[in-house]
Image (spheres, grey):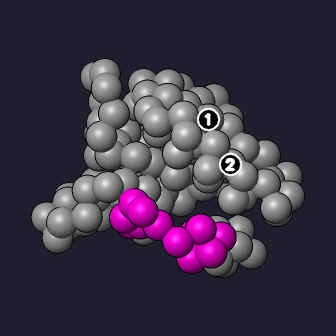
Amino acid sequence: MNKILIVDDEEKVRKLVEITLSIGKVEILQASSGEEGLKIARETRPDIILLDVMMPGRFDGFDVCKLLKEDPATRDIYIIMLTAKGQKADKEKGFASGADDYFVKPFSPMELMEKIDKVLS
């Protein structure tokens, strides 16, 4: 079974994404901080990570993405930034940190599902 990790400090966003993705046959993991997201990603090696940028704590989404992409054990995880930070500079920073894709909130659940289906197939 494919695993998707949702890393976002807002519970309602995690729930919305979980409900959107629960239509398919995937295991959904959740983390509410960058630190927790890193730990879960390293322990479970999900197929996809949906990663918010702005989170409390030591690591924001850019940091988490960079750390995961620098680690040979996790560098192949497909990372989609899912964030309200939609400026051109934010997107550039996301891709520079290693993100594979970038969705700006509010996002289209259908577009997200299509992207995830494409990645997992």
Viewer-side label of 1, 2: 2
113 up-or-down from 74: above or below: below
Q: Nearer the viewer, residue 99 or 87?
A: 87
Q: In which quarter of the view is residue 11 placed?
A: top right
Tag count in the figure? 2
What residue did someone put label 2 on? Answer: 18
Secondary-structure class at tag 2: helix
Q: Is residue 51 magenta?
A: no
- Disc 1 target residue: 30
Dots 1 and 2: beta carbons under 8 Å? Answer: yes
| Image coordinates for residue 113, horizontal then vertical, percent | 65, 70
Query: Does 91 sit left or right of 102 as displayed?
Result: left
Q: Residue at x 31, y 26 (%)?
A: 56
Range of residues picked out in magenta: 102-113
Q: Confirm whether the magenta stretch covers residue 103.
A: yes
Q: Secondary structure at mark 1?
A: strand
